[in-house]
Amino acid sequence: MTGAALTVEGVSVTLGGRQVLDGVTFTVAEGGFCGLIGSNGAGKTTLLRAALGLVTPDRGRITVAAGADDAPAVGYVPQKISLEPDVPLRARDLVGLGLDGHRFGFGRRSAADRQAVDDMLDAVGATSFADARVGTLSGGEQQRVMIAHALVGRPRLLLADEPLANLDLRASGEVVELLARVGADQGVAVLLSAHDMNPLLGVVDQVVYLADGRAVSGRPEEVVTTETLSALYRHPVEVIHAQGRVLVVAGPGATPDGGR
Amino acid sequence: MPGGPLVARVLGGALRPLVEPGFLSSGPVRTALVVGTVVAAVSAAVGVVTVVRGQGFAGHALADIGSAGGAAAVLVGAPTVWGFVAFNVAAAGVIDLVGVDRRRGRDVATGIVLGVALGLAALFLYEDAVSTTATGTAVVILFGSLFAVPTTTVPLVAALGAASALALAALWRPLLLTSVNPDLAAARGVPVRAVGGAFLAILAVAVSLSAVTIGAILSTALLIGPAATALRCTARPARAVALAAVTGVAATWVGVLVAYDSADWLGGRGLPVSFCVVAAVVAAYAVSSVAPAARRRRPPAPPGGG
């Protein structure tokens, strides 16, 4: 561990009068693979948008390790892309936009850039549908293409917003495996948000668990415990291990006559 | 056609079996072809981005809004193209200011501006009819007549067309990236809001130019028709723009030719040129529906690939 790819220090964000993030602190190590876990509305997307500079925190500071030369500091896989099947954008065009989509003007890509696109498509296993329109691809195929788009510029940090949502079990397992492998190959740190931690357990080396805008961070076995999560939720919850899966359920205090 | 430009002579020779005598030596026809070519190419290119960005409704609304501008220009004795451009750019500005980021908010803003403008169009066209000597103003504003474009308008149309094309080329990649996901573009430092506003201005100018050619109401046909045709035929973005431009220009030429010739076929009174252009656009779209790319989900997998 040489340093932090992402440092979040005491970040609070208020949107529309509602406190979405409340003193969130954690770091993601260089090359680390970190799951950002929380239910809908816990503040996952806001945290990722803040790390991208799209939301300004009221308090606190977010530091992203600078990329090399003109490489983007952060690669981003948004939760949703809106491409109809008739949009004339092939998978390889979308990956190419990861290199030059922010530049004005029009131009032919250099041979080196075209090679970088081909290599990235190959690395994510998208070569067989590289010439298909992105809008016609399945959800899992689109995620592969978006991951290639985010990584082709060689950032130090990849932020992926719910990349497993709307994927079936097999596709979601493949995307997690892909992120772990490509992240390790390229030495890029990955912060991936998810509402279900199960596909990530055993793969991530860190989790950041968000509830009501507050966060705890650490190794999964430290964070995903009855004690830690009850303290985070400020409400008794119970962590149940069943058949290799982890469930977080409301604890005994949740029922009116609960208690041991 | 002695003294005619070389291109005209060559084309005249090639097309002789199809073309009624005097086609390319007629001044209005030449003006129609020059203006039609510029306008069709620009509209088609802008149309591709309009369809990709899901702004077809804004394009259609701007086309109708322009009719108020064209009618106002006739009232004050100005060239109609200025009226179209002034009203469309102003309307685009209002839509951009009012329309929030969400598509529905944008649609509501567009709808309100459209309603106001159509009310004004009704007023101005009425005033045109009762207070000016020009006859058929409403028909020319709403449905256009490429043969009635004054030669003095040609430089202005060419300049506005070139400016729109250059602006579209400059914004090409950020427009594509923004259409994938606005946050993605913003995270890369694209000024998403400014790019969106600039595109709306480009769209306003393109639609104004089409309105000069085939009328305010029909100008959507030149914007969306060739683009839709191209999107059925190719998966590549730059190729879609080129193919749309070729389709739009070809449809315009066919339309002008048929309108000119139809005067002879029908014994004096020919078909309106706008009708012929739109018919050619629709025919191109119909042909594209049997294009292989329209049915193919993706290229066949390479042997042994998986």
Image (cartoon, rainbow, N blue to C red):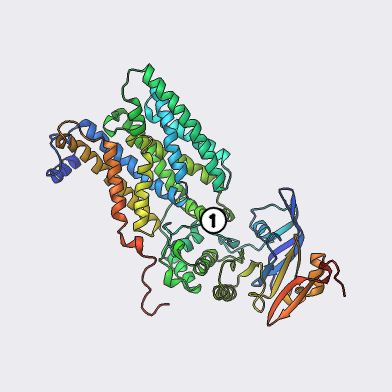
From the top left corner, tell me how far across and down residue B58 is, in percent.
47, 42
Of A189 and A164, nearer the camera is A164
| The quarter of the displayed image where residue B232 is located | bottom left
From the top left corner, tell me how far across and down residue B77 is, in percent.
38, 21
Q: Is residue A201 above or below residue B63?
A: below
| The quarter of the displayed image where residue B271 is located | top left
Of B126 and A142, nearer the camera is B126
Q: Residue, x 27% and y 46% (percent of image)?
A: B250
Pointer 1 chain: B
Q: Is residue A97 above or below residue B261?
A: below
Which residue type does callout 1 highlight? Asn
Question: Horizontally, is B203 left or right of A33 in the view?
Answer: left
Element under disc 1: loop
Image quadrant holding the C terminus of chain B, namely: bottom left
Judging by the rendered image, the residue that carries numbered circle 1 is: B181
From the top left corner, tell me how far across and down residue B125 is, in percent.
40, 25
Q: Residue furthest right?
A: A260
